[in-house]
Image (cartoon, rainbow, N blue to C red):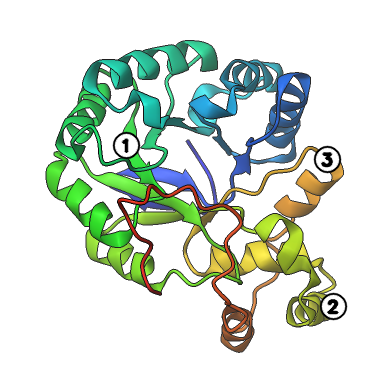
């Protein structure tokens, strides 16, 4: 897969700007995935629990993009963390998507079954060719370390909520220690960040929107961003972020907006988010 704006982890090239499909259902999911690929997105993100893997696969087919030219991510849901259930879902997800995903993530951590069983099953899915790479989603840094210690294969990313209103310094440090990546879901905080005066000021300077500046902010930090929209014009706007660059001061000013705001917190009470 070729992408000018990508990062490579363990030999896997991941486009930094992806298209998220959470809450996109039926024809909307099919339409927007096809349009995103036509616009130029080369990373599509879905999950079992989104209930749209079939439509995502149809949208991919509609776009007519060669399989080796885009990156596809899906996720194992928390009810499927035992060995047999995980492997069954991995097989069925590939069938629904119409091709083997490049990346298979554990969507959220749970205290049961034992993490060792789930990580072993995730590795087995990779060994069976049900995914090219494996990773995590919504894992605090200590649990990420534990999961990697249990995993024979590199866990190439941890997909977590990230935007200017939330600090994830501990996760960034852990990603660097492990030689892995971070992927930002809800990078625009469901629109909340767009009303921030600092972001609006910076956007005016570059003749860009607040959303474009925020996505650029994430990309320039070396993270992956997966914005979602059901609007084709907005999808095109979100993709148009590679013709300008923020200064270090502007990146710091946006980071200073952090106030621990979270869009969604479904972390099991058995675990805790990092303090910073």
Compare marks 3 and 1 and give the one earlier in the sequence.
Answer: 1
The nearer-to-camera label among 2 and 3 is: 3
User: In x, y percent, where is residue 193?
Assistant: 71, 67
**Residue at 62%, 83% in the rendered image:** 247
Q: Quadrant of the C terminus?
A: bottom left
Q: Is residue 195 above or below residue 266?
A: below
Secondary element under disc 3, as helix, strand or loop, is loop
Q: In the structure shown, which secondary structural element does the residue marked by tag 2 occupy?
A: helix
99 to 267, vertically: above or below: above
Between marks 2 and 3, how big is the CA–CA gap?
23 Å
Q: Residue 30: image x %, image y %? A: 71, 22
Query: How far is mark 3 from mark 1, CA to CA?
Result: 30 Å
Disc with the residue nearer the chain's start (1 vs 2): 1
Residue 114 screen position, x and y as percent: 18, 36
Instruction: Name the residue tied to disc 3.
Output: 231
Circles 1 and 2: CB atoms closer than 8 Å? no
Q: Residue furthest front?
A: 269
The residue at the point 81 percent across, 48 percent down is 234
Q: Along the line of sight, which residue is nearer the eye, 110 or 86?
A: 110
Left or right: where 232 falls relative to 118: right
The residue wearing badge 1 is 134
Residue that protrudes farthest toward the bottom in the picture = 249
Q: Between marks 1 and 2, how big is the CA–CA gap?
A: 39 Å
Give the tally of numbered discs: 3
């Amino acid at each position: 897969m070729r992408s000018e704006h990508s990062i490579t982890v363990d030999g896997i090239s991941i486009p930094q700007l992806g298209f998220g499909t959470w809450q996109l259902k039926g024809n909307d999911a099919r339409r927007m995935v096809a349009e995103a690929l036509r616009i130029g997105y080369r990373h599509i993100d879905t999950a079992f629990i989104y209930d749209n893997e079939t439509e995502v696969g149809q949208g991919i087919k509609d776009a007519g993009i060669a399989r080796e030219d885009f990156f596809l991510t899906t996720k194992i849901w928390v009810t499927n963390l035992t060995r047999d259930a995980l492997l069954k879902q991995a097989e069925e997800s590939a069938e629904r998507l119409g091709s083997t995903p490049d990346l298979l993530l554990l969507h959220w951590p749970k205290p049961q079954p034992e993490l060792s069983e789930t990580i072993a099953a995730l590795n087995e899915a990779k060994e069976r060719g049900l995914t090219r790479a494996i990773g995590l989603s919504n894992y605090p840094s200590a649990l990420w370390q534990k999961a990697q210690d249990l995993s024979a294969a590199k866990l190439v990313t941890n997909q977590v909520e990230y935007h200017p209103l939330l600090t994830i310094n501990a996760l960034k440090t852990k990603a660097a220690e492990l030689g892995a990546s971070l992927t930002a879901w809800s990078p625009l905080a469901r629109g909340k960040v767009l009303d921030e005066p600092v972001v609006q000021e910076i956007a005016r300077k570059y003749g860009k929107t607040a959303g474009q500046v925020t996505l650029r902010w994430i990309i320039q930090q070396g993270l992956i961003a997966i914005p979602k929209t059901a609007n084709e014009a907005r999808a095109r706007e979100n993709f148009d972020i590679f013709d300008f660059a923020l200064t270090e001061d502007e990146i710091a000013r946006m980071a200073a907006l952090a106030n621990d705001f979270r869009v969604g917190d479904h972390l099991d009470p058995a675990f805790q988010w990092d303090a910073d």
